Amino acid sequence: MGGLLACDPQGGGSTATAGETATSTAGETEASTGENSTAGETEASTGDSEASTGAPTTSGGTGEELGCADVRWAFDVAKFHAVGDLAVDSRGHVRATVPGAEVFRVLDLDENGVEVGALEVAYAGNAVRWGGIDGADNIVLQVQENGPQWPRDWVRKYALDGSLLWEVEFASASDGFVIGRPVPGSDGSVLVTRSASLHKLGADGSVVWELPNPDFMQPFVVNAAGVSVGWLGATRWVRTLGSDGATLWEVEWGEQALDDRTFAVDGAGGVVVGEQHHALARFASDGTLAWEKSRKELGRPIDAIAMNEAGQLAVLGTPGEGSPEVLRLDPDGAEVGRRACAQLTSQKVAIDAAGRVTVAGYDFIAENGQFDWWVVAFAE
């Protein structure tokens, strides 16, 4: 894969400020991934970014050493590195972010668990935040730089080969500070949240619409139809927006207005909200409560969730004593399976279009006091 510049607007692709158009240098295709990944961040720089070329040739492991069953493959992450975010793209490849001492890496693990590439973004005193992947398997990142007067930040889209397609710079002085992460849609669009405004960028980086954001809404995920779901900062209110940015419905739900919430939306506009120590709830496309399961009913806290476009749901949590476990639920909330590795403390979860679950977590090695991180893809 070819090299590119991480923060230099002249390093590849096109650039624009917010409100202007950034023309893509590669075509976009439309596909549905239905993935939701947890936002992660690390420090990043205005230095170089490049895609790795020396991909391993061996296949993924079996996970037997982790006490796993029904595993397609298990990938041992490089020592002294942890996985920050996890998603599955339209090819069935797992994308995992691995913040390191000098670079922010996005691994590309194929259907056999083989690392076939990695986008690498160098850093030195600034920040890179994972956004996600769109339907064409392009990567969306947010890069922030702490300037002497105002911090600067860019939303950037990278192609599968690591080339920079476009970037859009936002100004804190006029747009407000960053809230959350940029959220890509399967059609190539990207939602960007600011303290003062909401922005929808098209597949080519051009501005589709801009709206004021007076109550600090933070979108978390968007489906193939452009329906996004998020919450209003420091409240219990959940809100959905249509593809035009108009409010579809909003509802007050839950017990606490804290950061222990996770969100997912399927292709029909059904929304699932999880509150870690309270409950899991599914709302229909009109905001009606379809079902609710308490933490006691589930037998675990709701640490992370992921849902595909078909509404199949993966819920990660630790059932009392033992290792974290993933419950697989159908759209009606009925359990259809569960997956776990006895020696793996899973912290991230993703689900593909076929309903197969992937987790990332660590194994504690008592002999040397190290944490060894793994990505594990379960079978049906």
Image: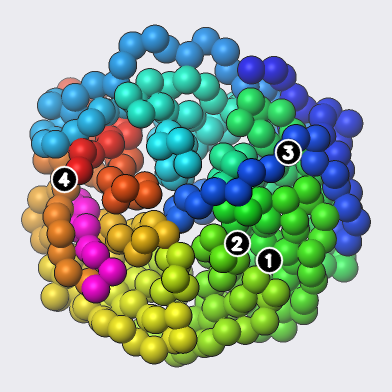
Question: Residue 113 vs residue 132: left or right?
Answer: left
Between disc 3 and disc 4, the foreground one is 3
Q: Which label number is shown at residue 340?
A: 4
Among the two numbered marks 4 and 1 on one chain, the one whose residue lies closer to the N terminus: 1
Residue type, numbered disc 3: Gly
Residue 158 horizontal/vertical position (percent): 68, 36
The residue that appears at 67% across and 22% down in the rendered structure is: 50
Residue 265 horizontal/vertical position (percent): 45, 67
The residue that appears at 31% across and 16% down in the rendered structure is: 59
Q: Are marks 1 and 2 in contact (CB under 8 Å)?
A: yes
Residue 373 horizontal/vertical position (percent): 32, 32
What crowding class fits label 3: few (fewer than 14 Cα within 10 Å), some (14-19), or many (20 or more)?
few
Q: Is residue 131 visible?
A: no
Residue type, numbered disc 4: Ala
Q: Which residues are magenta?
A: 324-332
Question: Residue 67 vs residue 97: left or right?
Answer: left
Q: What distance separates the C-alpha of mark 3 from that of mark 1? A: 25 Å
Between disc 3 and disc 1, the foreground one is 3
Which residue is tagged 3?
27
Among the two numbered marks 1 and 2 on one chain, the one whose residue lies closer to the N terminus: 2
Q: Which label number is shown at residue 180?
A: 2
